Amino acid sequence: MRGRRLACLLLALTAPACAAAPAAAAPAPSARALYAGVARLNGQLALMGQGASALGLPPRRRTLSELRFENRDGYTISVVAFGQTVALDVSRARFRLRGRGGARRKLRERVLETTYLAHGRVTPGSIEASFGGLGRISMRFRPGGRQVRATRGAGCRKPSGAAIAQLGAFEGVLRFRGEGGYTAVDARRVPGRSVDLRALLACLLGVAPNAAASLPAPHAPLGIRLPGLVSPRGAPGVPSTPTHPSGAPRSTSLLASRKEALARLVFATQEREGGAARFLAVEQASAGSLGIVRLAYARGAAGRFSFDDALAAATVHPPAPFSGRAELRRGPGDAKSWSGPLAVSFLGAPGVPLTGPPFGVSLSQGF
Amino acid sequence: MRDRRHPRRAAAALLAVAVALLATAAGAAAAPPSATLRPASSRHALSFWTPQRMRRARPLDLPAPRRGGLVHASASPAADGEGRGVEADSEARAEFAAVEDPTAPGFRRNGVIFISLPGGSGLGRCSGTSVDAPNRSVVITAGHCVNLGGSRRWFDRDWVFVPGYHDGIRPFGVFPARWLGATAPWVEEGSENADVGAAVVGRNEKGQRLGGAVGGDRIAFGLPPGQVFDVHGYPAEAPFDGATQRLCAGTPFLGHDLASFLWRGPLNLAISCDVTGGASGGGWTIHGDVLNSVTNYGYGDDRRTDFGSYFGGAVRALYRKAASVR
């Protein structure tokens, strides 16, 4: 242990991320935390209509490698790797504390996140992939001697005591420079883990380790359940259908979407009666040997999304990272106009317009 | 006929194919799984497929689509556009034009595949291509036209190939399958990056081998993805009716589907062509008669874009195994 600390100390002189290596006393992650990286990616893809199991890892892909650290510029960098897929995620979130005492909650005010997907070579002990002109990863996993086991304390439904994950660090090279230089990563040693996916699923789902199990269906990221985008099984929902006919306040949603051959851009806003308005933009694109998913989210006051009772007109004026405003107007028949200087600045893609004729728009209410 | 459309590419094609055939596989491909059909099954298939049954066959409707929004080109299209709450896309599509004479030398190697679906769940159809092989009996199609994907369930009942099919006519007869195979990533985990299948067919009613009756396209592996493709197929969902062969001519590689980054195998290929159900397995040829991909799937809200598998090591292994079946 002492030798490892010394090595890290020496490496830290040139590699800032080394300072974020896991402390021995840090609590072991729960099973849900081990699954969080995949769940986040799955949720992003579900938002784009890729469905429940676009990331349906079959059990034969047994290893899920993940590393995560905070870069010196404040961005959180994570890499999730399985099979041939290597997903590098850059994100930054701003939170606000709400409530008092034990009821205090962290609310996400703003989220910016871009995920870069590449095909690479992933083994239980290594990750290698190129992100084209943006960078590359070539790292080996060094177990730190700590394990997460399938126990009730780890959150397993059916504790078996089997090892779910090895905790340790990835060493090697991770170099990445976001488009336009919005972030620059140069890491040599970062905290990470190697997860036995089959054991993790057995723990989460409460099934035997050798049972045929599929990943849990994605949840709507950021809590936004938009009609037509995400439903519990990932299948497209139906607009204007009351999907939760409970006593909950009614929600109103506006969805604008543009689809091209290998790209999709979605803007959505949702407001629950009496609550804040939430704004989301997601863009997916395939560029050469990279797949890119960009996400921007913001909460704003209810008045930033206004609409009439007949749902014939609406106005949105979201806070940063959005800019400008847009208006939806229904004309005769099914004619609609969606216009205004509304734009969003994603990580790596600033000033992306969110209005215009290529967008299809719907305005609907549900429960 | 297709060679005439691309006369300047013919010489380059010969060189490219020679290089491709000699090149070593990018990685060691797992042995492709396969199923051998009983001779009695082949005989039954020949008598089973009457013209009336062929007309009744519908594009395969896979029981459990793995992704919302994604529709196999053999599947009955769902109302995805409406389901997402977005406006239907009304922009012009790449034209899947009717081939004037599907029995002409350049087109007769393409045909319709008819299948009795397991469990009496109906009659299905796909598209396929006869390719050159020592046994003169190999058909290349989509993996999901021979195997359910992610399982060992083979579509081994009454599987037949009808080259040059049009308007219920079987100008070169019916060729029943005696062997079915698919790439390992398709059978093992249903990877859409490797949705390629093959069949070795028996003789037709006249006792002819497939290669003798219609010839076979050449096949190339390991080429750069940036090719210009002629996309063939028999789309049977609206606005098409499956009665004849159709062609999207000279459509260039656009890129890779985002979802392709999540699946095992080389990244797949996107081109512009307004395929519908029934076109699955239809051949993508380059340089006139060199098969280099097949139609796999599209998205319900973007009918203009067609996705096909890259022909790399796994497809090469499949072809070699099929070509070696005696």
Image (cartoon, grey):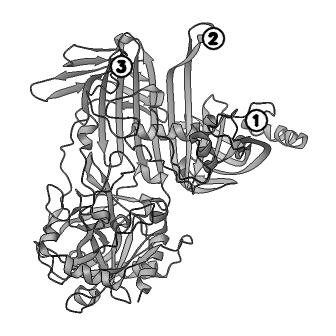
Which amino acid is tagged 3?
A: Ser
Check disc 2 and report its element: helix, strand or loop: helix
| Image disc number at residue A22 | 1
Which amino acid is tagged 2?
A: Gly
Which amino acid is tagged 1?
A: Pro
For the residues labelled 3 and 1, the Cα–Cα distance comes to 44 Å
Residue B213 against residue B119 in the figure, above or below: below
Q: Are marks 1 and 2 in contact (CB under 8 Å)?
A: no
Give the class, few, some or many, for how many residues have Cα within 10 Å of label 3's Cα (few <14, many ≥20).
few
User: Label 3 lies in what chain?
Assistant: A
Whether residue B163 is visible, yes or no, is no
Looking at the image, which residue is at 47% across and 31% down? A221
Q: Marks 1 and 2: which is nearer the front?
A: 2
| Image disc number at residue A102 | 2
Give the class, few, some or many, for how many residues have Cα within 10 Å of label 1's Cα (few <14, many ≥20).
some
Q: Earlier in the sequence, mark 3 or mark 2?
A: 2
Check disc 3 and report its element: helix, strand or loop: loop
User: Label 2 lies in what chain?
Assistant: A
Q: Marks 3 and 1: which is nearer the front?
A: 3
Q: Same chain for marks 1 and 2?
A: yes
Q: Position of residue A167 (x, y in %)?
A: 73, 42
Residue A155 against residue B226 in the figure, above or below: above
For the residues labelled 3 and 2, the Cα–Cα distance comes to 27 Å
For the residues labelled 1 and 2, the Cα–Cα distance comes to 28 Å
| Image disc number at residue A246 | 3
Q: Position of residue B99 (x, y in %)?
A: 14, 70
